[in-house]
Amino acid sequence: MGVLSLSRRQFQSPYERFCTVLEHVMERLKLSTRERAMLREPQHEHAAELSLQRDDGSATVFPAYRIQFNNARGPYKGGIRYHSAADADEVKALAALMAIKTAVVDIPFGGSKGGVQCDPKTLSRKELQELSRAYVRAFAPHLGADIDCPAPDVNTTPEIMAWMRDEYEKVTRTYDPAMITGKPLSYGGSRGRDTATARGGFFILQELVDRDALDPKELRVAIQGFGNAGAAMAIFLHQAGYTVVAVSDSQGGIYCPEGLDPIRIQKYKKKTGSVTGEYCKGSVCDIEKMKLDHVRRVTNAELLELPCDVLIPAALDNVVTAENAERVQARYILELANGPVSPEADALFEERGVTVVPDVLANAGGVTVSYFEWSQGRSGEQWTDEQVDRELKRIMLDAYKAVRRTARREKISYREAAFLVGVQRIVTTMRARGWV
């Protein structure tokens, strides 16, 4: 691929980036024209405008979406995000990735996604609750345990899931604890759901490191994003003996070649709102204390290029591109975020022998434990922590082994291998059901 072609494709939308990988895989599988058409486009695209009366009496309208990509293997499944960038294209791309993801880990779901284009940080708790209930009222006919089961995503929480379940049951006059996952434990949630994304990624990384005969104590890790998944992953790795050298959040990050204590960082982040909170107040930092602890402040962009063995993007999409991929020093990249590595960067990493564990495998722990919660909601059972952890590990490692085998057999990247495994499973089911 030439330089001109690379720079032109840097501006692909999230959905175009998804299609870049999908097209390669469909060509490799020699799918029919009809099969390709069914995998390229969602089955349903629902949109609404949610009118919200603000606390000051004014009214605001927010665009909202629920995109249902493919339900060949089971009910649609996918989170709801509240974000200013959650437009139709982004939600469509995420729904498509969910269809692949659920197939990769071989759980009986399809793929969907929801979004409200808003900045939830500007909303009061009362406004946030009314917006969440309005979302359910708008899309209730398209939701349900056997139709489409939502979950938390960016800027949505267990409390929001509880509001949504309550509103759904009011609207439909039903009792349906399995219609949504990621709920509080006291309201039909599952143990282990809060750390499931990180826990699943941790199991994958441990297996990868073990198979490559590496010692965790000799591996340095940088994590971009210290939200729920990134913070939990940092703590799991620290406890397993890895050296976490850098972490960041939306306000920037800190780097210490000798290693950081994520538990301490989490404490200060809760107290100050930032991972740099122990050393900095806004842009003013205690330079002497930083020197004493051998810590320096870094930007999110700088973190990606630090000396490390494992890089974990756990925040935004499209942060590693053709423009900065050559400066990334990590040997392993584990995608806890959705779509952080562009197709062009993927190609460059493949040439250099850098292993990229793709989002549809690496961050599938969240949807896997959502499946456990869905099952518990339908049966009335309550699993133990040990049961959740055991089953999560089994499913994640089975998925990893299937992807690894495919990558080695076909001599392709982990991303293409994961897509190939997922697409093959979806197509096999579509054929069995007579859809194609």
Image (cartoon, grey):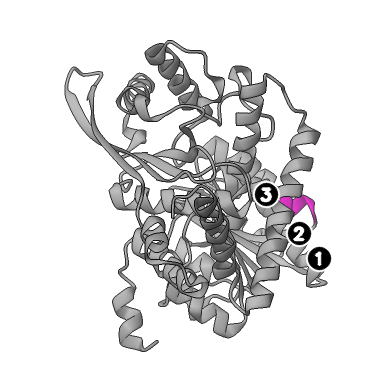
Residue at left 60%, top 69%?
Answer: 414
Position of residue 17 measured from the top left corner of the image (x, y, whole percent): 39, 65
Q: Quadrant of residue 212?
A: bottom right
Tell me the chief SS of the magenta region.
helix
The label number, if any, that marks residue 210 in the structure image? 1
Determine whether the residue tagged by mark 1 lies in a helix, strand or loop. Answer: helix
State the CA–CA distance, disc 2 to disc 3.
10 Å
State the CA–CA distance, disc 1 to disc 2.
6 Å
Q: Is residue 424 left or right of residue 218?
A: left
Going from N to C along the chain, the mark reached first, 1 or 3, is 3
Image vertical order of residue 432 relative to residue 159, above or below: below
Q: As rendered, which of 435 and 2 lies closer to the eye?
A: 435
Span highlighted in magenta in the image: 234-240
The label number, if any, that marks residue 206 in the structure image? 2
Residue at left 51%, top 57%?
Answer: 427
Position of residue 103 measured from the top left corner of the image (x, y, whole percent): 57, 52
Going from N to C along the chain, the mark reached first, 2 or 3, is 3
Name the residue carrying label 3: 200
Q: Residues within 10 Å of mark 3 (few under 14, many from 20)?
A: many
Q: Quadrant of residue 127?
A: top left
Residue at left 45%, top 20%?
Answer: 163
Amino acid at pointer 3: Gly
Image quarter where the C terminus lies is bottom left
Q: As rendered, which of 326 and 352 lies closer to the eye?
A: 352
Image vertical order of residue 421 relative to residue 233, above or below: below
Q: Is residue 327 left or right of residue 207?
A: left
Amino acid at pointer 1: Asp
Position of residue 238 measured from the top left corner of the image (x, y, whole percent): 74, 53
Q: Are marks 2 and 3 in contact (CB under 8 Å)?
A: no
Q: Residues within 10 Å of mark 1 (few under 14, many from 20)?
A: few
Image quarter where the N terminus lies is bottom left
